[in-house]
Image (cartoon, rainbow, N blue to C red):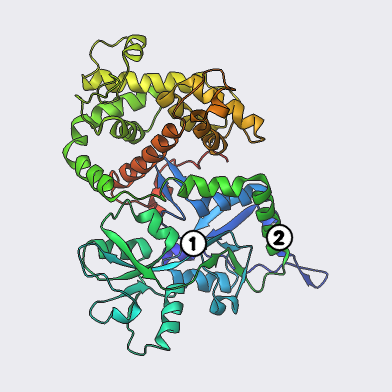
Amino acid sequence: MKFFSLLLISLSFLVACGEAQPHLEEIRERGELRVLTRYGPTTYYVKGEELAGFEYELAQAFAKHLNVKLKIIVPENLGDMLQLIEQGRADIAAAGLTITPARKDVLRFGPIYQEVTQQLIYRQGTRKPKNITKLADGNLEVVANSSHVEQLKLHQQELPELAWVENSELDNSGLLELVQLEMIDYTIADSNEMDANQTLFPELRVAFNISEPQPLAWAMSLSDDGSLNHEVAAFFTQMEKSGDLDRLIEKYYGHIRRFDYVDTRAIHRRIQTHLPKYKTLFEQAAEEFDFDWRFLAAISYQESHWNPQAVSSTGVRGLMMLTLDTAKQMKIKDREDPAQSIHAGAGYLSSIRKRLPQGITEESRIWVALASYNIGPGHVEDARVLTEKGGKNPNLWTDIKQYLPLLSKKEWYEKTRYGYARGGEPVRYIENIRRYYDILLHSQQSSPFVTPEDVKSSNLTPPAAL
């Protein structure tokens, strides 16, 4: 508990003229927003060399909105988090918390920003329970103090024999891993957490929903005078109007909604059998051209499944599936040589990224560059023109990707400079690469999520601004 003694915040009631100082004013004077969260793919973790996570980026944006620094605090378990925020010992709990009747009695919630459904999870290859009455033959384990416990208690009113174990040490990702390893039979996860973890634990399946859709929101203490809650509401209104909230949801969930079991199992196998042969080459190219090596490896897997002799029907070949023109431009002689292919592919992608218009946001540049790598810069520029004519932002990938598929429709491509293209292809191409990159990130580090020691001992940087 030493960690907590350093991080926990004492209640601060500065008195002026006999009245408590408004909470929001206290935060601004302090210069720091203190946010409780938890480790996990939907909240807060390390991605490459950066701190990332949907809740983390939301909290970071709110701290910027207030013009204060962000202080992230991760309690040891969910029960501690709820108790700390209830007692007013932190400003906000941003941890994908479900609004439940029991929690509303003790916490103040901000605006709803997502909805999730609680799902019963089992492992493929074991017997799938048809409904909640069929769980007697297996052991069900859930996170202690979670909304899942509340939901199970509601079901228990009609099914007194319903039983489960509450785990106060592991989070949802930990329990999902136990199901994957067949150490427990079932757990319950929110639908967004199951989506985010599916590629990491490909044997897991959803048996059925145990709840109706439930809202997620930030939580604050009931003792808050309302000033912070009012500002949180204003912030979310601003995020919705600007489209930044939708873009953030797309960033973290857009590429994981379509799960392909066979494909996911295949990359997990090839990470063991194929990747070690080329890892050093990816690392060398990444260092030279300023990429994450796992990102280059993800591109290569999408292109060739790490087969250096791969050849397509159109004649592109090698680990990075280079055309003859690209090989000549990058001055390599043998496209099937792994070292030449990886170096040329990374160099070519880097050159595209550098040539992109300066107005394209930092967050979008790599995806626009990848689309150009796949379909050609001219067609991507056509899509950017259509995006602008459609009233969207031609400098944001989330907007451009909506217009790329139109390049295959005559009524649209006739209006463009470079004409017809299979515009939906680069969209699928990038979604696949994002999935592979996530898998590689988690498979190539001892722990998939950030720890306090990681934060203290590294120079991790926050992700690019929205």
Quarter of the figure with residue 221: bottom right
> Closest to the observer: 313 or 75?
313
Q: Which residue reaches farthest right?
A: 17
Q: Residue 392, image x and y in percent?
A: 64, 36
The residue that label 1 is drawn on is 6
Residue 342 in picture, x, y percent from top left: 29, 23
Of the numbered discs 2 and 1, the one sitting upstream in the chain is: 1
- Hey, what amino acid is under mark 2? Leu
Residue at 61% over, 26% down:
385
Which residue does the image show at 26% across and 69% down from the upper left? 128
Which structural element holds mark 1? helix
Give the number of the disc on residue 160: none
Count neighbours of disc 2 (C-alpha within 10 A) and say few if under 14, some if 14 to 19, many if 20 or more.
Answer: many
Image quadrant where residue 125 sits = bottom left
Q: Nearer the viewer, mark 2 or mark 1?
A: 2
Q: Residue at x 29, y 55 (%)?
A: 201
Horizontal relation, residue 434 to residue 365: left or right: left
From what the image shows, is residue 101 above or below residue 352? below
Q: Tell me the quarter of the image containing the C terminus.
A: top right
Read off the residue under disc 2: 24
Q: Is residue 338 above or below residue 110?
A: above
Residue 47 seen anywhere in this rendered image of the structure: yes
User: For the residue labelled by badge 2, is the local secondary structure a helix, a strand or a loop?
Assistant: helix
